Image (spheres, grey):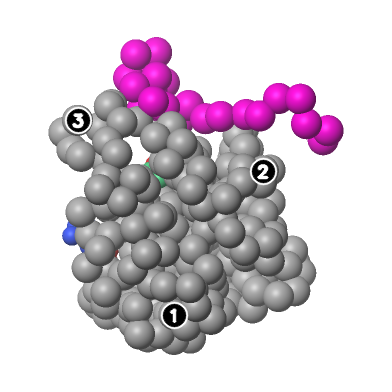
């Protein structure tokens, strides 16, 4: 394993890490030397997913736990669940998040209308998370615009940027490091309030995928130095 990019992050719990987006990111971070725990509502499902992923990676890179245990054993949390499960999942882990960073990649989609922007009651899933968790938790928005299809094979080049929004500079720096560890450029896109725009881009990308018959259209910010 190689050294990971942020010495401040020792371990990551991916809540909902049995799913498409979370498992794909988890593999990439584990390969970069982070200790990654796949969290699930079900211990059996977590173990089954981790067994499969570790077989694919060729070594016991990932650990399996129920979400609550995963969060207690991690320095940084990544929340990767459907919007319909966002609030109940946060309620289930809230007691263990004090002082930690939560990177929330939930997109407030309203299936079947996934090609149209849905603005939730709290304006953005990330803002709803921050309101629920309070000021002792640093919520960061990231990875909403990155397709699991592109991430799934860790050898694939993921040709896009990751927009990162948050109100705590250190927490955003951790997210930038994790974007880079997963093979992308992390771009500071401002305060958490800007997550409204970042989350809203995903249905736009899904519409573009459908219209141009592609998988995993992404975004790239031009005009920045490399
Ligand atoms: N897929 C993508 O390409 C992509 C790209 C960017 C952003 N996102 C966003 O990332 C989040 C996760 O996406 P995903 O595609 O990984 O989702 P997913 O595979 O459908 O679900 C992720 C995990 O959420 C957990 N979960 C908790 N409560 C649930 C419920 N009520 N119904 C279904 N699953 C529940 C499940 O884990 P357990 O059953 O193990 O608890 C599931 O494996 C979503 O908000 C999505 O919009 C996805």
In the picture, the disc for residue 97 is: 1
Residue 100 shows up from this direction: yes
Q: Which residue is mark 2?
A: 187
Determine the residue positioned at 43% across, 41% down: 196
Q: Within 10 Å of the Cα at label 3, are there few (<14), some (14-19), or many (20+) other Cα atoms?
A: few
Residue 50 shows up from this direction: no
Name the residue furthest left.
112
Q: Nearer the viewer, mark 3 or mark 1?
A: 1
Rendering coords of residue 156 (x, y %): 59, 40
Q: Earlier in the sequence, mark 3 or mark 1?
A: 1
| Image position of 24 (left or right of 111) | right
Q: Where 52 falls versus 47 (above or below)?
A: above
Determine the residue positioned at 33% across, 68% down: 132
Relative to the observer, which residue lies in front, 120 or 67? Answer: 120
Of helix, strand and loop, which one carries label 3?
Answer: loop
In the picture, the disc for residue 135 is: none
3D distance between C-alphas at marks 1 and 2: 25 Å
Range shown magenta: 204-226
């Amino acid at each position: 394993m190689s050294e990971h990019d942020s010495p401040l992050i020792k371990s990551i719990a991916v809540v909902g890490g049995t799913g498409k987006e979370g498992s794909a990111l988890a593999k990439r971070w584990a390969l970069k030397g982070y200790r990654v725990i796949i969290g699930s509502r079900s211990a059996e499902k977590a173990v089954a997913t981790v067994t499969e992923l570790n077989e694919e990676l060729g070594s016991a890179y990932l650990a399996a736990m129920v979400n609550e245990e995963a969060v207690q054993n991690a320095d940084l949390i990544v929340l990767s669940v459907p919007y319909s499960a966002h609030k109940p999942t946060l309620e289930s882990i809230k007691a263990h998040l004090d002082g930690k960073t939560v990177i929330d990649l939930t997109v407030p989609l309203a299936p079947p209308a996934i090609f149209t922007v849905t603005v939730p009651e709290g304006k953005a899933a990330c803002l709803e998370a921050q309101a629920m968790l309070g000021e002792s938790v640093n919520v960061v928005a990231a990875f909403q615009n990155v397709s699991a299809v592109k991430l799934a094979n860790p050898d694939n080049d993921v040709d896009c940027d990751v927009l990162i929004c948050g109100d705590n500079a250190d927490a955003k720096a951790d997210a930038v490091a994790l974007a880079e560890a997963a093979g992308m450029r992390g771009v500071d896109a401002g305060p958490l309030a800007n997550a409204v725009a970042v989350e809203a881009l995903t249905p736009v990308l899904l519409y573009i995928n459908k219209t141009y018959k592609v998988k995993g259209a992404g975004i790239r910010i031009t005009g920045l130095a490399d």
